[in-house]
Amino acid sequence: MFDYFCAIGNMGWAFVKGLGVTFKYLFSPAVTVQYPYEKLTPSELFRGALAFHPDLCISCDMCVRACPSNCISLEAKRNEQTKKKDLQWYRIDFAKCNYCRLCEEICLTKPKSVHHSREFELTFTSRNDFVVEWRPERPQPKALEPGQEWVKFLTQGRPPGRRRAKSPEGKK
């Protein structure tokens, strides 16, 4: 009989503690981010989409060898005058990339020619869009940072204050 009342008392105390937590957060200000218009800053170690700088690349092929998912490929041609490799094209398949950062760690150039950016909102509409190719002769697009060839895949939110127009049938 005593154990029965102890169990009821313990359950009642647990209920009061739960309500205490609820009331503590009920009257504190809400922390809400209006996502498409306001964005949180990711941490320093965040691994976003890969960015590539064709002007910094020395075509050493180390990133291609280090990639465990074979999502990076490149073609380089040896220049007979300078005896160095010239980059022809560099391709990344974002569908295969597992954001392991091995390509960035093994890159020999300073600053890195391939690195993870802070972008996390890429939207691809077809499988062909996942494959992004850089070429040295192609001008780089205007973006948040250089090397972002995929800037056209960034999501764009509606500007604040714009709402869907009401249908004429709804008016009386």
Image (cartoon, rainbow, N blue to C red):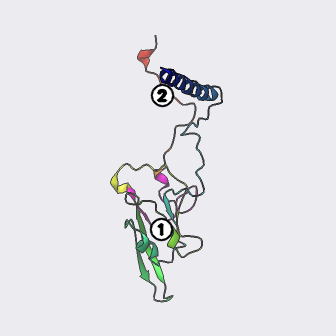
For disc 2, the marked residue is: 164
| Sequence-earlier tag: 2 or 1 | 1
- 98 horizontally vs 104: left or right: left
The x and y percentages for residue 49 are 49, 57
Q: Amino acid at mark 2?
A: Arg
The x and y percentages for residue 61 are 44, 76
**Disc 2, SS:** loop
Towards the viewer: 48 or 158: 48
Where is residue 32, by image quadrant?
top right
Where is residue 88, by image quadrant?
bottom left
* Residue occupying the point 46% across, 85% down: 79
* Residue occupying the point 34% across, 51% down: 126
Towards the viewer: 78 or 40: 40
Which stretch appears magenta? Answer: 130-152
Towards the viewer: 96 or 168: 96
* Main SS category, magenta section: loop
